[in-house]
Amino acid sequence: MLLCGFGCLDEPEIKDRWTRVDIQNSNLTPNQAFAPGTQIPVTVRAQITYRKIITGFAVAELRRSTVPANSVVVHPEAERVTMANSIDAILANSVTLGRSTHAFTGWDHLQQVFDFSFTGVAPAATDSSGAPVGFFLVCYMGEGEEIEIGGGQDSLVVTPFPSVPYELLPVGMELTVAPPGAN
């Protein structure tokens, strides 16, 4: 006997309703340690699963942040809304150490795979005041604007889309700066 009427089905989880970025593979691993100043070749294969029409730029980037790593949750297997809020905080309080971008246009249920490749650099373990810095690989989406810089060259400025208003789930991982003298 069927006792369930309309409304018995639960609404899908946010991770299944919001556009999400997932790392399929990378040459970096969570909490991997790097000596300060090390040149880091980065490769990331990311998949975006769209849940609405959106156009912009997909970005994979190394970031040095004033947000301490122990105050955020950034790991490919972390709860996604918590991680989205953490990545928003990192992006608002950090500088790039290397990145790669791809333009995209997506619509509901489309899945696109992007291969990113770039060289970044590991930051110093502390900022100028001696406070530890956060070091992260993040994959996110944003709006881009090309600007002309000296010598007739162009540069792309990407402004990250805020996660909650745009219903986006970026992804990332914490990396570690090895203290001086560590192997």
Image (cartoon, helix red, strand yellow):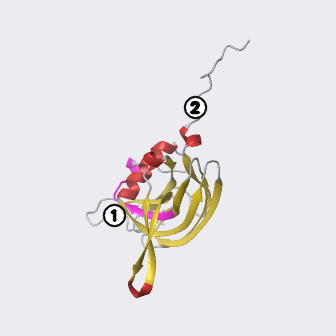
Taking the image as shown, residue 135 lies to the left or right of residue 1, namely: left
- Can you say whether 4 is above or below 99 in the image? above
Foreground of the two, 178 or 88: 88
Magenta stretch? 60-71
Taking the image as shown, residue 107 lies to the left or right of residue 143, namely: right
Taking the image as shown, residue 107 lies to the left or right of residue 36, namely: right
The residue beneath circle 1 is 126
Point out the image quarter for the N terminus: top right
- Find the residue positioned furthest to the right: 1
Quarter assignment of residue 145 = bottom left
Amino acid type assigned to the residue bearing label 1 in the image: Thr
- Find the residue positioned furthest to the top: 1
- Measured from the top left, where is residue 46 in percent x and y? 60, 58
- Can you say whether 99 is above or below 86 in the image? below
Residue 110 forms part of the magenta stretch: no
The residue beneath circle 2 is 11
